[in-house]
Each structure stands twice: as structure tokens, then as C-alpha cells.
Amino acid sequence: SQQGEEDPQALSIQEGENATMNCSYKTSINNLQWYRQNSGRGLVHLILIRSNEREKHSGRLRVTLDTSKKSSSLLITASRAADTASYFCASRASNTGKLIFGQGTTLQVKP
Amino acid sequence: GAGVSQSPSNKVTEKGKDVELRCDPISGHTALYWYRQSLGQGLEFLIYFQGNSAPDKSGLPSDRFSAERTGGSVSTLTIQRTQQEDSAVYLCASSLSQGGGEKLFFGSGTQLSVL
């Protein structure tokens, strides 16, 4: 498959808890990005981490990248009901411009 | 425009008919992508345009699928002789360029239903 792998496929937590999603990819990359999708339509960009970076923060988001394991994780701290959505990682291979998405993790945050 | 615009937002067609899906990217964005998403699934890459370079068509599932980008702006994805398995949301995205603003801006998609 051209797509990366994400786990878990679904995650259900209580408001205030942290949510961790993992992503694996297949080729050498220039960067890896995380996107959020509400209601199965357009995606919104959350954060980008380059291949020479190991960790990046943006508000309540923390992304890590391990190029030796070809994996990344997205941590959402102090989750809110409004964080309920599907989250996708997307990797841009070093030798191509196309962005390949993972299967996604569906997050439900219960109030 | 203010964002990526896709039309129509919904399209119902009969098996065997041809359909055209349109994407208006953000003005000035040189890269344009088409993806397909089946219900509850991830995004399947279809095709990628970057400036005046030859498009990357490696994701098109069959020769019934084709796409054009005229004048480096508007793009049209055409599906000929539609099949029921073509039913999905077709998403378009644009970005400034690979070297600078690599993040993608997505349209709201076209929901295609083939009866």
C-alpha cells in the first residue's frame, strides 16, 4: 500500500486526558505533517516536522519524529471535547513531491 | 480566492456516465493535489501537479481517470465510464511550493455517488 500506518485506529478518552497517536511511514522523508479532519471533508494542517528535527511543539500539540524507526507520534495534552476528530499523518518522500497520508486515527473526547 | 474551492460539493451519477470535478486552488499556489477518500478510510493519493513540471500521475487507479490543470490554476479531474467503486469523496489541495510552504490547504471535497 502507498499509505503509511497509524495506530490506534480509534481512541476514546475523557476530557482532560492526553491522547497519543502513532504513525509509521515507508521511505526516507523530507518532512512529516499532521492533519485534522472533521466530518469527513476538508483537512486542516496542524504541524510539520522536518527530517532533521526530533520534536516540535505547537500549543497543546507535541510531535516527535524517529527517522531510524520511520515513525512519528502526535500527543494532544489536556484534551477537550472539541478535539474530537480524525487525525492523519502525511509523509513527503525525499525523492518526490507527493504527500502520502496514513489511514488515520479517530479520536473521541468525552466531556 | 480565500481558500481552495471545489465544485460540485455533491454529485450523483449513473454507472457508465462521465463526471468532471473542479478545483480552484488558492491564488499563487503552484502545487495542486487530488486525493480520494472512501468512507471511514484514509486519503488515497491520485495525482500531483507542480508548476510547469509533468504531473505525477502514479496514483490514478485506472485509465478511466485523468486530470488537467490549465494555466497553472484551475484543475479538473475527469472520471470516464463511472463505476460504483468510484463512489467516494474527492479532495483537492494546494500549496505554495515544495521548497517553502509545504503545508497543504484542502477544499471541502466533492462527494461522488455512483448509482
Image: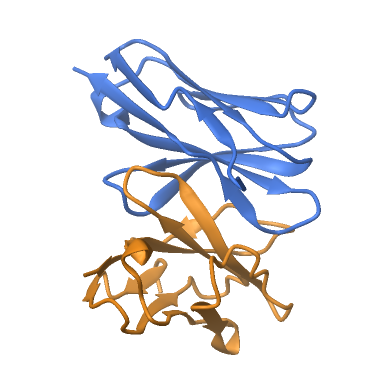
Chain colours: A blue, B orange
Horizontally, residue A50 falls left or right of residue B19, namely right
> Where residue A15 appears, x then y in whole percent?
27, 14
Quadrant of the drawing holding the C terminus of chain B: bottom left
Q: Is residue B90 left or right of residue B98?
A: left
Indicate the quadrant containing the N terminus of chain B: top left, top right, bottom left or bottom right: bottom left
Q: Residue at x 66, y 57 (%)?
A: A98
Which x, y percent locates residue A97? 71, 59
- Residue at horizontal 71%, vertical 81%? B52
Image coordinates for residue A35, horizontal then vertical, percent: 48, 42
Q: Residue at x 42, y 82 (%)?
A: B80
- How many numbered markers are drawn? 0
For image coordinates 43% across by 35% down, the residue present is A87
Up the image or down, B54 lies above or below A72; here it is below
Establish if A6 lies above or below B68. Answer: above
Relative to B7, B75 lies left or right:
right
Residue B112 visible to the viewer: yes
Residue A37 figure quarter: top left
The answer to whether one can see residue B107 in this image is: no
**Quadrant of the rendered structure where residue A69 is?**
top right
Vertically, is B29 above or below A8?
Answer: below
- Residue at the bottom extreme of this rendering: B71
Residue nearest the viewer, comparing B29 with B55: B55
